[in-house]
Image: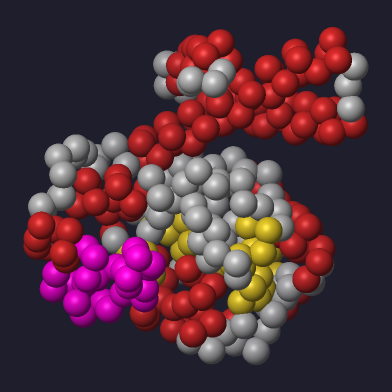
Amino acid sequence: MKSHPREWQIARDAVLEVIETKNPKKIAEWEQKINREQKTLAQQTQRGLPSHQAKNFGSKLIQLQIQNLLLNEYYQRLSHQHLEGSTPLSFRDRWICNFLFFRQNLTRKPVSLRLFKILWPFVQQKSRFLSLVYKSGIYCFFSKTLISIIAQITRGQSTLEIAAGDGSLSRMLNNYGAKCLATDDHSWTQQIKFPEDVENLDAATALKKYRPTQVICCWPPPGNSFEREVFKTQSVERYIVLTSRHEFACGDWAAYRSQTDFEMRVDDELSALLLPPEVDPYALIFERKSLQ
């Protein structure tokens, strides 16, 4: 807003105009359009432009980037619109949440289901806590049982996590005996501090480089352009997606439905082990049909 006030105003007005239609299909189509434009402009800019064109292209690219950020914020708010709250966390709520979900320095840890069932009902400001962790790129938490099951499913096979964020999921899986490599394109540096063990690779490049048999992704951005690459990668036998049941808030559902090589199923057991239930978690498992 401070660095690019003109681009901010244009982008904001465009997003508000399409959101006010309250038409999910129209919003999704518009988002796909700006993603295509952003990709085209980025490619043209990389090839080099005359000075008289570079300024206009740069301004347009900034507008598209702002529109994407605003849309992501809108999707997150919409998917959790039943979770309201703005007052500071009470000492009790802060203590319970830190004890349940984090190690030192707010590093996520596998959550004890027994303790979660006992303590979570005592948290009065659940919505406020969730809104705070969203700002750090944390959209869910993993129970010990969920980590154990996924580690057992993937054990002995090469596993790649794409869009891994801070790499918490891969780290937990590896501690439970899996061999999972975390990768991310590091595009969310304003929200996430990327550790050294999260390799700086976009999903398409990571899939080509490692040719994994199993892929996992947690809370992929809505309408993203990289999940479809998973289904195109011949080495992949299983794809596990930890996501939300709100299709407009998370995941490339168009790719999920249009692909024909994998059988998609909702795993109710894993869904129930993704925490907390207020985020409406959904665990999807894609199995290559030729292996069934």
Q: Is residue 102 magenta?
A: yes
Residues drawn in magenta: 97-120
Residue at point 43% right, 34% down? 73
Say whether residue 272 is left or right of residue 241.
left
For this view, does 25 lie left or right of residue 50?
Answer: left
Q: Is residue 239 visible?
A: no
The answer to whether residue 225 shows anywhere in this view is yes
Residue 5, percent from left and from top: 52, 14
For this rendering, which residue is in front, 56 or 116?
Answer: 56
Q: What x and y, as percent, mark residue 170?
A: 54, 73
Q: Position of residue 167 (x, y in %)?
A: 53, 66
Which residue is pictured at 15% across the width and 50% down the height? 89
231 in relation to 288, above or below: above
Magenta-drawn stretch, dominant element (helix, strand or loop) = helix
Whether the magenta-drawn stretch holds residue 5 is answered as: no
Tell me the quarter of the image containing the C terminus: bottom right
Nearer to the camera, 87 or 50: 50
Within the image, what quadrant is residue 82 found in? top left
Total labels: the figure holds 0
Query: In percent of the image, x 62 and y 51: which residue is there?
Result: 186
Above or below: residue 5 compared with residue 62: above
Rendering quarter of residue 147? bottom left
Which residue is at 29% across, 59% downward? 277
Left/right of residue 80 with respect to residue 97 in the rendered view: right
Quarter occupied by residue 121: bottom left
